[in-house]
């Protein structure tokens, strides 16, 4: 399996990642691998498809949605 080297990670970022790893009961390397794997699981296309599924589900429950374009235009006219 290939390796990745990331240089010049800010101290604050490294500290936060180490704390996150501890909370997840993982080593820093395991936590970084999990973050990377999770970040590539969901493409923009998949996210949009999920959003559409949620909107259909809410619509079937009787919810209505206004078009935000109209709301933005009204707000800008003020």
Image (cartoon, helix red, strand yellow):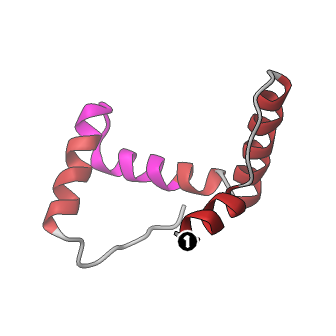
Is disc 1 placed on a helix, strand or loop?
A: helix
Residue to which mark 1 is pinned: 76
- What residue appears at the point 62 percent right and 64 percent down from the top-left corner? 74
Residue 52 or residue 6, whichever sits in front:
52
Give the residue at the far bottom of this rendering: 8
- What residue appears at the point 52 percent right and 69 percent down from the top-left corner? 78
Describe residue 25's horizontal placement relative to residue 75 as left or right: left
Residue 75 or residue 34, whichever sits in front:
75
Depicted 31 relative to depicted 11: above or below: above
How many marks are shown on the rendered structure? 1
Q: Which residues are magenta?
A: 21-36
Is residue 23 in the magenta section?
Answer: yes
Q: Estimate the x, y position of residue 21 in percent, counting from the top left.
A: 28, 41
Depicted 44 relative to depicted 26: above or below: below
Describe residue 71's horizontal placement relative to residue 75 as left or right: right
Give the residue at the far front of this rendering: 78
Q: Quadrant of residue 76?
A: bottom right
Describe residue 44's horizontal placement relative to residue 28 as left or right: right
Describe residue 6's horizontal placement relative to residue 61 as left or right: left
- What residue appears at the point 34 percent right and 51 percent down from the top-left corner? 29
Quadrant location of the N terminus?
Answer: bottom right
Q: Estimate the x, y position of residue 42 in percent, counting from the top left.
A: 66, 52
Is residue 14 in the magenta section?
Answer: no
Instruction: Judge the density around disc 1: few (<14), some (14-19), many (≥20) Cα neighbours within 10 Å.
Output: few
Q: Main secondary structure of the magenta part?
A: helix
- What residue appears at the point 43 percent right and 70 percent down from the top-left corner? 4
Q: Quadrant of residue 72?
A: bottom right
Q: Estimate the x, y position of residue 61 in percent, counting from the top left.
A: 80, 21
């Amino acid at each position: 399996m290939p390796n990745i080297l990331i240089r010049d990670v800010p101290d604050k970022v490294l500290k936060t990642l180490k704390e996150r790893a501890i909370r997840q009961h993982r080593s820093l390397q395991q936590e970084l691998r999990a973050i990377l794997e999770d970040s590539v699981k969901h493409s923009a296309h998949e996210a949009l498809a999920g959003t559409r599924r949620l909107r259909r589900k809410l619509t079937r429950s009787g919810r209505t949605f206004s078009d935000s374009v109209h709301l933005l235009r009204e707000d800008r006219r003020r």
